[in-house]
Amino acid sequence: MNLSVYGEIALDWFADYDSSVYYRWGGAGLYASIGAAKQGVNVDLLTLLGPELSKSSIALWKSFGISFQYADKIDSYSFPRYLITGYRNFEKKISRPMNEIKMDYNYIPEIPPNTNGILIFPIGHVIPLELCIKAVENKIPIFLDPKLNNESIKDARKALKYTSVLLANEEEIQLLAEEQTVDRAIQKLAFLGPQYIIIKKGIKGCTIVREGKDSIDISAFKSNAICTVGSGDVFGGAFAATFLETNDILYSVELASSVVANFVEHFEIGNCISKEIAIRDMKKRERLNVTAIDDIVIYLAGPFFSQQEVIWVNYIYNKLQSFGLKVLSPSLENGIINESTDEKQKKNIFINDIKLLEQANIVVALLDHNDPGTCYEIGYAYKKGIPVIGLKTDNSPINNMIVHSCDIICNTLDELIVEVCNNYGRQ
């Protein structure tokens, strides 16, 4: 089986919390090609190559089963560079271009002989419509994965009528359809060409939309993620390779999800697993049951009187929010008591905080600072039958009353989010 991947190679730079900086070769084209080649298909990477890429890197990728025969070598070409933050589990990834100017090359390669399918990403924000037309003329299915920028989205709209499978996240789906909600966007896109739409939702899994059939939600597999960058592209490559061989949309998504769960547990991209290992992994790896977390409302209990406490509470709040959870924070909703707050205002804040807590179906309690107000909120929630999940990141002892008022006490934010989604997200 032969898959062609049209997409860029790039240099990804990673900025860590402690100001450490790491880099690796990446880019959607390379990530997807590795994901596909590891599944046993022959991959032609249709991309641009510049002089700064070493022969040893190319030799390594060739050893995975990736061919560069149809790539265009340009002496003046400078690879795109991206500075990336928020690349761990449950973090919101931000990728910033480091190149001052995005080089625009009109790269329309030949379709390699015996190609069974083409997976297309933008190169320089451009999706090659001519390549799409040639593929359709030769009855070659197109897997299209646009990226989140205006130029790519505009081109992707034109390419939809040539597309067999559209792979995109929820925001891209809405932009493509020019709709305010995902549901309306799906309804619109379903009539514009793609036979299948795969909506990628990160650790929330994905949704398969099939022409004339009900959609299917697929939960993601659990993973101890070190770096999530490139995971959506690896998913696309593994999915396209498997679907070309099996024509089984559900199985292809499941296997690609297993490949991704393993991929994000390593920093080196060469550790992407083979089809045989993925098949075994699918049978034993647990899933994240987060297909329905819209009903979860969290009351965030914690102290916010010192600058350090405010920073910690806001950090947890933003992390939970970025994952798609609804979070009620008394400090943000009802204000903070200070020296100028009179007794009437204090009483109103107390009453409003209680009302806010009663709106929640989970309390997340921050236990590091041994705060009396947080202890009261835990006890109130316990009496009301509202589950309490504690977050304790230090090793200091916890009062017995607090231990037995909490349903569980987590030591990391990752554990906390998994606990919330697995045990309190209604399926």
Image (cartoon, helix red, strand yellow):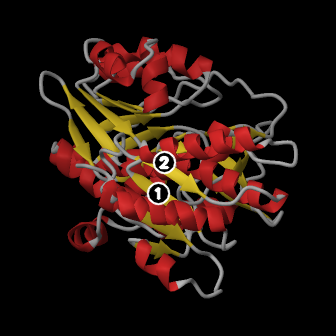
Q: Which residue lies furthest to the right in this view?
A: 339
| Residue closer to the observer: 117 or 256 | 256
| Residue closer to the observer: 416 or 337 | 337
- What kind of residue is marked 2? Leu
Tags 1 and 2 touching, CB below 8 Å: yes
| Observer able to see residue 353 | yes
Q: Residue furthest front?
A: 343
Nearest to the eye among marks 1 and 2: give it. Answer: 2
Alpha carbon separation for disc pair 1 and 2: 8 Å
Q: Determine the residue positioned at 54% across, 50% down.
A: 320
Q: Is residue 425 left or right of residue 145?
A: left
| Residue closer to the observer: 161 or 115 | 161
Tag 2 secondary structure: helix
Q: Determine the residue positioned at 58% across, 61% down.
A: 227
Q: In this view, does 372 lie to the left or right of 22?
A: left
Q: Determine the residue positioned at 49% across, 28% down.
A: 171
Q: Which mark is residue 177?
A: none
| Residue closer to the observer: 402 or 283 | 402
Identify the residue position indicated by label 2 in the image. Answer: 357
| Image spot of residue 183 (x, y percent) | 32, 22
| Observer able to see residue 272 | no
Height in image: 41 above or below 157?
A: below
| Image spot of residue 85 (x, y percent) | 70, 51
| Image spot of residue 258 (x, y percent) | 33, 61
Other-residue count near label 1 (Cα within 10 Å), few / some / many at <14 / 14–19 / ≥20 = many
Height in image: 56 above or below 43?
A: below
Identify the residue position indicated by label 1 in the image. Answer: 363
